[in-house]
Amino acid sequence: MTNAFVDPLASRGPSLTELDARAREVFRRIVESYLETGEAVGSRTIARGGMGLSPASIRNTMQDLTDLGLLGAAHASAGRQPTHIGLRLFVDGLLEVGDVGETDRRDIEARLSARGRSFEELLDEASAILSGLAGGAGLVVTPVREAGVKHVEFVALAPDQALAVMVFEDGQVENRLMRHALGLTPSALLEASNFLNARLRGRTLSEAKAEVTAELGQARRDLDAAAARLIEDGLAAWGGDGAERTLIVRGRANLLEGAEAAVDLERVRMLFDDLERKERLIDLLDGVRGAAGVRIFIGAETKLFSLSGSALIAAPYMSGRQKLLGAIGVIGPARLNYARVIPLVDYTARALGRLMED
């Protein structure tokens, strides 16, 4: 089955129409061998594959592909491997993507449908599923919280510590531990709670945060100073402008498998650095939320991966009523097994969506 996941938003290099039948076949064999072994491919390896061409003819074709920017080599006499532009052309035009196997389907469905899971635990499991089945690290961006606030309360835990509790209309509860100045009185805690309850109840954080912050500035002189500071710190802790979303990452250890050479280990180190830039990854995955189907990012196509040469395969997950919630995917070296990972990400996103309720 040919690829049904061509990314319409990907940056473009040469097209398949620029390659004749021989060049396409040589290119396909080189990329498939590289994805399987991680090794650069020489002309003799291709010749032994039964193409009926001499190594010299194959070398000439490989040079043409190199001139087009589809192949690269460490030095002139070395074998060739696909560039990121070459991988993009292969994924979009030559990759054959099948369906998810029945065993994988059963595994995904069983693990996601386990009873008694909270919303956060379900997302965590989805990330773990992808890291286990697809290799690489599994990523999930949690949805922007759109439920209104039902109740806010600050509870004293220690002389310099309070627990900020926010209950939402969808039944979810968020707690934040907060440090505060010594001597915060019970009346100040109650005053802070009442101030926020009066202004947040029934509204989303994103709807109310700017207005509440502005009103706090005007009301500060009428509030206990400690209560005003607690309100300000509480709003910062909860976010309200999308900052409450999180990035769940599972399976970092998978990225070390097969990375034995110094250059491979350095790329993994840079990929770990990419994973620590969670805000930038969330921004990248936000683009996936607005797309239909699977999106694929390879290497320098995005600034985030320009150093590590990583690849990200991601898809949006939706509620049962087709409401966009977040994104899920797999990140790893550009040598990912695209034929396996693309349908796994697509199926897991759809299975996750079927379990979500508006």
Image (tube, rainbow, N blue to C red):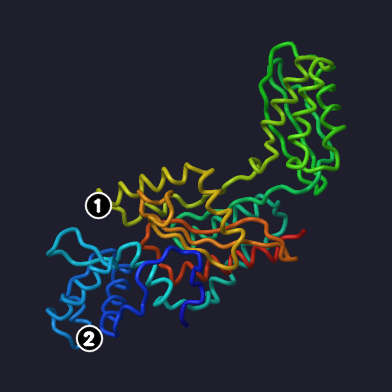
As rendered, which of 178 and 293 lies closer to the eye?
293
Q: Examine the image and state in which quarter residue 285 appears.
A: bottom right
As rendered, which of 188 and 132 lies closer to the eye?
188
Residue in view at x 24 percent, y 52 percent: 261
As rendered, which of 195 and 49 lies closer to the eye?
195
Q: Examine the image and state in which quarter residue 74 appears.
A: bottom left
Left/right placement of residue 128 relative to residue 338 reads right
Q: How many numbered discs, if any? A: 2
**Residue sticking out furthest to the bottom:** 52
Position of residue 198 relative to residue 293, above or below, is above
Mark number, residue 181: none
Q: Examine the image and state in which quarter residue 75 appears.
A: bottom left
Measured as percent of width and height from the top left, residue 132 is found at: 49, 60
Residue in view at x 85 percent, y 38 percent: 201
Residue in view at x 56 percent, y 55 percent: 127
**Residue sticking out furthest to the top:** 183
Q: Which residue is mark 1?
A: 261
Mark number, residue 51: 2
Amino acid type shown at disc 1: Ala
Instruction: Say if mark 1 contacts mark 2, CB within 8 Å.
Output: no
Q: Which structural element holds mark 2?
A: loop
Left/right placement of residue 204 relative to residue 21 reads right
Amino acid type shown at disc 2: Met
Measured as percent of width and height from the top left, residue 317 is found at: 63, 61
What quarter of the picture does the C terminus occupy?
A: bottom right
Q: Which structural element holds mark 1?
A: loop
Q: What is the distance, in whole Å, between disc 1 and disc 2 at their CAs?
A: 32 Å
